[in-house]
Image (tube, rainbow, N blue to C red):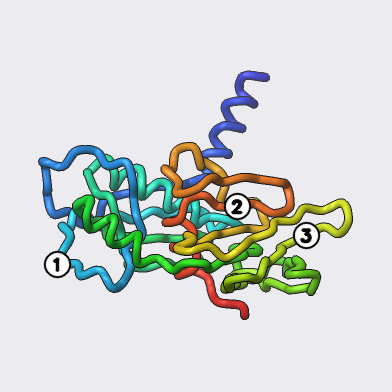
Amino acid sequence: MRRLFLLLAIFFANAVHSQSVKVINSAGVKNLPKAFVYAFLEPSIDTMQVQYVATILAKDKNRQSVIEGLYSEIRKKATELGANCFLIKSFARDTLKHESVLILDSYYASDSIINLNTSKHDKNVVYVFGEEREGEKTMTFNLNGEKKEIVSGTYYKINLTEGKDVMISKGGVAGESVTLSWMNDKQTLFFTLSGFGLSRLADQPAFGVGFNTGKINRIGNVSLGLLLTKLLKPGN
């Protein structure tokens, strides 16, 4: 009886967590080695400079935090095919089917194009995310001591300026804080006040180190962070 209960528990857990990924279009490229990065392509990069590999779809239950898992599954499939960069094709939350679907166009780019693409990312910009899905609770943090709110499904954008430090804090006296300073060519930074952005981080080559203080979490994967800024809405 106990074994039967365990099997039923596993079955229902799998039924609830129905994540799937599939290639919905492919160029049929066969000679590419497995890739180790999966970079967000800036719009200014001409797709004539990169090689189309495949269009990949991932779907999962419309959970509170789902984008990172969808990105991770697509990334795994794409890099196996040799793709090392991507453009967003679509993202949707289907409330009737209770699922979320992310579709990315995957490409192969030379090292020089990947480096050029990286150089085009914004510099000295900080994004702070609250809850990922709309309709969840509003989250708050302090920016240089001033209370700020982040409505779910949005982000707060901060531009660093030379000579002025910025302190992000949460939780009052017993909370956590991060102090940030302008630096020449400083990469974009991404922080989340909720739990997403950190799972499976070890499987994602990161430009910078991710960390989790329990209140302010840094997303170390720049491509995931940039993806989130395109799928969520500006809140300030």
- 200 or 99, nearer to the observer: 200
Secondary structure under the numbered disc 1 in the rendered image: helix
Q: Residue furthest right?
A: 173
Residue 41 appears in view: yes
Placement of 218 over or under 43, stated as above or below: above
Secondary structure under the numbered disc 3 in the rendered image: strand
Placement of 132 over or under 10, stated as above or below: below
User: Could you classify mark 3 by the number of other residues whose Cα lies within 10 Å: few (under 14), some (14-19), or many (20 or more)?
Assistant: many
Residue picked out by circle 1? 48
Placement of 20 over or under 224, stated as above or below: above
How far is disc 3 from disc 1 in space, using C-alphas?
A: 45 Å
User: Could you classify mark 1 by the number of other residues whose Cα lies within 10 Å: few (under 14), some (14-19), or many (20 or more)?
Assistant: few
* Residue at x-position 47% and y-position 60%: 187
- Disc 2 marks a residue whose amino acid type is Arg
| Mark nearer the N terminus (2 vs 1) | 1
- Can you give x and y, in whole percent of width and height, for residue 212 in the image? 66, 45
Residue picked out by circle 3? 170
User: Could you classify mark 2 by the number of other residues whose Cα lies within 10 Å: few (under 14), some (14-19), or many (20 or more)?
Assistant: many
Placement of 23 over or under 143, stated as above or below: above
- Disc 3 marks a residue whose amino acid type is Lys
Residue 154 appears in view: no
Q: Which mark is drawn over residue 218?
A: 2
- Can you give x and y, in whole percent of width and height, for residue 62 in the image? 54, 59
| Mark nearer the N terminus (3 vs 2) | 3
**Quarter in which the N terminus is drawn:** top right
- Please give left or right for residue 71 compared with residue 172 in the image: left
* Residue at x-position 23% and y-position 58%: 113
Q: Which mark is drawn over residue 28?
A: none
- Please give left or right for residue 31 compared with residue 66 in the image: left
